[in-house]
Amino acid sequence: MMMTDDLLATLEKLDQQLVRLIADRREMVGQIPGGLTTDQELEIMSLWTDEAVERELPEDAMEKMGKMLNQICRKRGE
């Protein structure tokens, strides 16, 4: 079993990866002329909730995270 320090170090690396992925996604959305459409954002939300259910994550919290992610990426395109 991993020691607490090892677990914390691994969590830190995962968090850094998450932030990099969000920044990469924001940059990619910014390259789409006009950004994502409302329909595309709704489709993404569906993906988030479907994945949440499949991975036994709280669906409502994941939906909120997906909405925040869309908001972050939308601001880049403005």
Image (tube, helix red, strand yellow):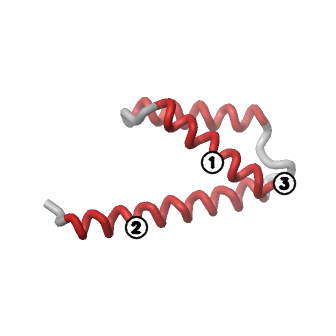
**Residue 69, label in figure:** 1
Mark 3, residue position:
78
Res 26 → quadrant: bottom right
Mark 2 packing: few (<14 Cα in 10 Å), some, or many (20+)?
Answer: few
Taking 22 as reference, is 77 left or right?
right
Amino acid, disc 3: Glu
Mark 3 packing: few (<14 Cα in 10 Å), some, or many (20+)?
Answer: few
Taking 6 as reference, is 20 left or right?
right
Q: CA distance from mark 1 to mark 2?
A: 20 Å
Q: Residue at x 24, y 69 (%)?
A: 5
What is the x, y in percent for residue 68? 63, 45
Amino acid, disc 1: Leu
What is the x, y in percent for residue 8? 30, 65
Q: Identify the secondary structure beneath mark 3.
A: loop
Taking 22 as reference, is 71 left or right?
right
Q: CA distance from mark 2 to mark 3?
A: 30 Å
Taking 53 as reference, is 41 left or right?
right
Q: Who comes first in sequence, dot 2 or dot 3?
A: 2
- Depth check: give the residue in front, 69 or 21: 69
Circles 1 and 3, Cβ within 8 Å, touching? The answer is: no
**Residue 13, label in figure:** 2
* Vertical side of 4 occupied by 48: above or below: above
